[in-house]
Amino acid sequence: MTPPVARDERTPTAPTVGLVVIGNEVLSAKVRDENGPLLLDRLARGGARVVEVAMVRDDPDRIAAVVREFAARFDHVITTGGVGPTHDDCTWIAIGRALQRPLALHAGMLERMEARNGGPLTPEQQRLAVLPEGTELVGDAHRWPLLKVANVWVLPGVPSMVAHRADKLAALLGGPRPWLCTVFFGADEWVSVPAIDSVVAAFDDVEVGSYPVFHDADHRLRVTFEGGERERVEAAATWLSDQLGTVVRIAWSGGTLPELAEPVRGAGAATWQP
């Protein structure tokens, strides 16, 4: 059995993120949420660590409470939804309350909107430029900006608009990508629990995830090992592999590797199924 490798306390920690998805239409299933899954994917690939996701109705007080809590707990907060000009678009009101910042017409945002519109805006259209004091416009002056107040990033709810900004936001918020080693076993999870418990106890700096497989596949159990140091992640994966045996294959991603650049290894590699 491979002994644990000493932990390096200098390993950088990924920035933490709290994600807030806003809208009655999402909670009532009138609209399927596409923004949450997209942002989770992009942020993970970019090296940010999403710690918690909240889904909240168009209720300014409740949105404010969640944003206030998340802003205190996490490095960054991202909200999506509720930033249009209609009666149910209350996100900016809520963020102003959460951060105790009054709302005012933002001259820079108004200028960009008028340039995009080709002329003056109606009072109703100007509502999009009424923002909490201190709101920053991030990005190219000729494009619709990312909007940031303190450590809160505010995105629209339209999925195509969020998709356009997701990669940019992930690049701004991300850090070093953790190493991820996935080991596919032929053993069932329910007989593997003592071994999994032992690796969790021995490697408290490696995040271990255990996922049983019940459909037709070449493995019965998928265990993931994730952490900032490849040596530690590899040692944890080896520790469990030595105890369980029945390794079908091993796959690496993250760290300094391009996504899934290192091929899977093992007898079942040719018949891999997701």
Image: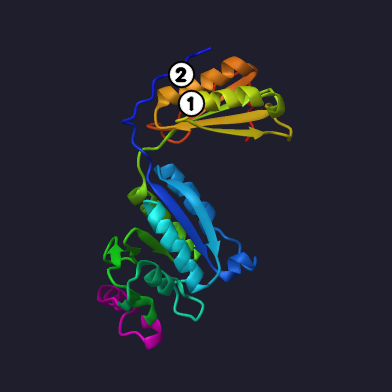
Q: Please report the residue visible at 53 percent of the width from the left and 52 percent of the height from the top.
A: 37
Rendered position, 249 above or below 132: above
Rendered position, 118 above or below 241: below
Q: Is residue 72 magenta?
A: no
Residue 146 visible (yes or no): yes
Rendered position, 127 above or below 78: below
Q: Secondary structure at mark 2?
A: loop
Q: Secondary structure at mark 1?
A: loop
On the image, numbered disc 2 is attached to which residue? 4
- Span of residues in magenta: 105-126
Looking at marks 2 and 1 on the same chain, the residue that comes earlier in the sequence is marked by 2
On the image, numbered disc 1 is attached to which residue? 203
Question: Which of the pair 150/109 is nearer the observer?
Answer: 150
Q: Are marks 2 and 1 in contact (CB under 8 Å)?
A: yes
Query: Dominant secondary structure of the magenta stretch?
Result: helix
Residue 196 at x, y = what percent? 60, 26
Residue 232 at x, y = what percent? 43, 24
Q: Quadrant of the C terminus?
A: top right
| Gap between marks 2 and 1 measured at Cα | 7 Å
Q: Is residue 150 left or right of residue 66?
A: left
Residue 164 visible (yes or no): no
Residue type indicated by callout 2:
Pro
The scheme the figure's colours follow is rainbow
Question: Which of the pair 202/188 is nearer the observer?
Answer: 202
Q: Is residue 123 magenta?
A: yes
Question: Which of the pair 188/35 is nearer the observer?
Answer: 188
Residue 82 at x, y = what percent? 48, 71
